Image: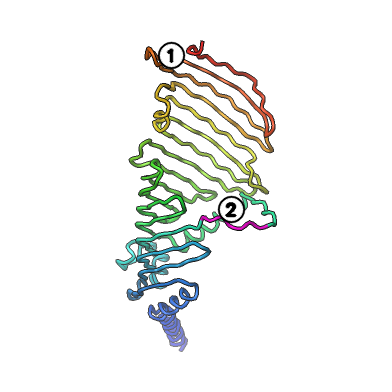
């Protein structure tokens, strides 16, 4: 008798689950919610219990506009099976993602907003960073995979074409297409969730001047810290910055720059100058103290003879937001004598 009751209860649960996840009922319910939010859709296709696909989707909100030729989303049964098994969705329309977006565009309203007379509240960056990290962790658990292909982001006067953007198990990857900034025209970037922060990497692909960036952001209980390094066509940068709880102004920051040549992007503007060594460092300490120390050397080409003449210089300084103290400085420019 007890076995029969368990079988009956299990059958009811299974029947309820089948009815609850039936694609045709879900498609109508989701369509109603989208229409209520002002989302316009030209065509809807239900792919069995696997996925639902919208074509010609557009949505305008707060002056911004999103359009997509095609978007496919896994239905609950496929979604739950994927979360439980860890395997990619079966429907071909989804590929290996729970959400798939193709041929999309995002137009961001950059018009100046009317400013309120009320003063803006101070931003607590450590607290905000922890909240964002928590949200991303939740997204990673609930939606482990998503992909967007052939997109355009417009924020006047800039426009950036993205070849592909994907989200997989807490790692967000971007492959750039075209933009007005040549150094960012083609790039690959990756941001991955860490237990207490985010790791970022980016590098140029077929750019006029190569560059790469690596950074790590740590979201502590009362402190937000970031450290990173970058290489930009011969220049090496290494820096750290930290914020304490209760504000958005950094409590401390350091930046070191080293190089052995002028980057190609700048060399065209100074063809008669060569950089051979550069070693500079700057530091900031709240509320308004800063220090600087640097040394550099190179060559300058004399216009008439074409002879290259060596130059060098170094300086040390410190100060605050209202004053500058030059503690040491020397310059060797023979061509001015």
Circle nearer the viewer, 2 or 1: 1
> Which region is colored magenta?
110-116
CA neighbours of label 2 inside 10 A, class few (<14), some (14 to 19), many (20+): many
Dot 2 or dot 1: first in sequence order is 2
Residue 212 got which mark?
none
Q: Is the stretch drawn in magenta largely helix, strand or loop?
A: loop
> Residue at label 2?
130
The single residue placed furthest to the left in the displayed view is: 92
| Residue drawn 65% across the image and 40% down it | 251
Asked if 136 appears above or below 302 in the picture, the reply is: below
As for residue 111 lying within the magenta part, the answer is: yes
- For mark 2, give the secondary structure: helix
> Residue at label 1?
309
Q: Nearer the viewer, residue 75 or 235?
A: 235
Q: Nearer the viewer, residue 293 or 178?
A: 178
The single residue placed furthest to the top in the displayed view is: 337
Residue 10 picture quarter: bottom left
Instruction: Tell me where residue 234 appears, x and y as whole percent.
Output: 41, 29
- For mark 1, give the secondary structure: strand
Q: Going by the image, does 110 lie left or right of 206?
A: right
The single residue placed furthest to the bottom in the displayed view is: 1
């Amino acid at each position: 008798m007890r076995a029969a009751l368990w079988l009956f209860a299990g059958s009811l649960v299974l029947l309820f689950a089948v009815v609850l996840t039936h694609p045709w009922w879900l498609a109508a319910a989701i369509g109603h919610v989208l229409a209520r939010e002002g989302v316009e859709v030209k065509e809807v296709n239900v792919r069995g219990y696997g996925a639902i696909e919208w074509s010609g989707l557009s949505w305008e909100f707060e002056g911004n506009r999103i359009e997509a030729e095609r978007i496919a989303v896994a239905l609950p049964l496929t979604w739950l099976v994927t979360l439980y098994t860890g395997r990619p969705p079966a429907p071909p329309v989804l590929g290996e993602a729970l959400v798939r977006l193709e041929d999309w565009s995002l137009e961001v309203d950059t018009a100046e907003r009317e400013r309120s007379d009320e003063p803006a509240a101070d931003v607590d960056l450590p607290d905000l960073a922890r909240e964002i990290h928590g949200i991303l962790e939740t997204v990673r658990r609930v939606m482990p995979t998503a992909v967007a292909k052939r997109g355009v982001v417009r924020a006047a006067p800039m426009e950036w074409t993205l070849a592909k953007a994907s989200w997989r198990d807490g790692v967000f990857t971007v492959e750039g297409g075209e933009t007005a900034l040549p150094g960012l025209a083609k790039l690959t970037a990756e941001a991955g969730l860490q237990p207490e922060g985010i790791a970022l990497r980016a590098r140029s692909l077929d750019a006029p001047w190569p560059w790469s960036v690596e950074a790590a952001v740590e979201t502590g209980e009362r402190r937000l810290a970031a450290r990173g390094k970058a290489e930009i066509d011969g220049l090496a940068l290494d820096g750290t910055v930290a914020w304490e709880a209760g504000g958005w102004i950094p409590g401390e920051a350091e930046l070191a720059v080293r190089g052995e040549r002028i980057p190609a992007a700048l060399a065209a503007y100074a063809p008669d100058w060569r950089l051979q060594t550069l070693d500079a460092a700057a530091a900031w300490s709240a509320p308004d103290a800063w220090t600087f120390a640097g040394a550099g050397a190179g060559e300058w080409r004399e216009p008439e003879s074409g002879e290259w003449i060596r130059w060098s210089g170094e300086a040390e300084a410190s100060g605050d937001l209202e004053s500058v103290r030059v503690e040491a400085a020397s310059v060797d420019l023979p061509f001015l004598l």
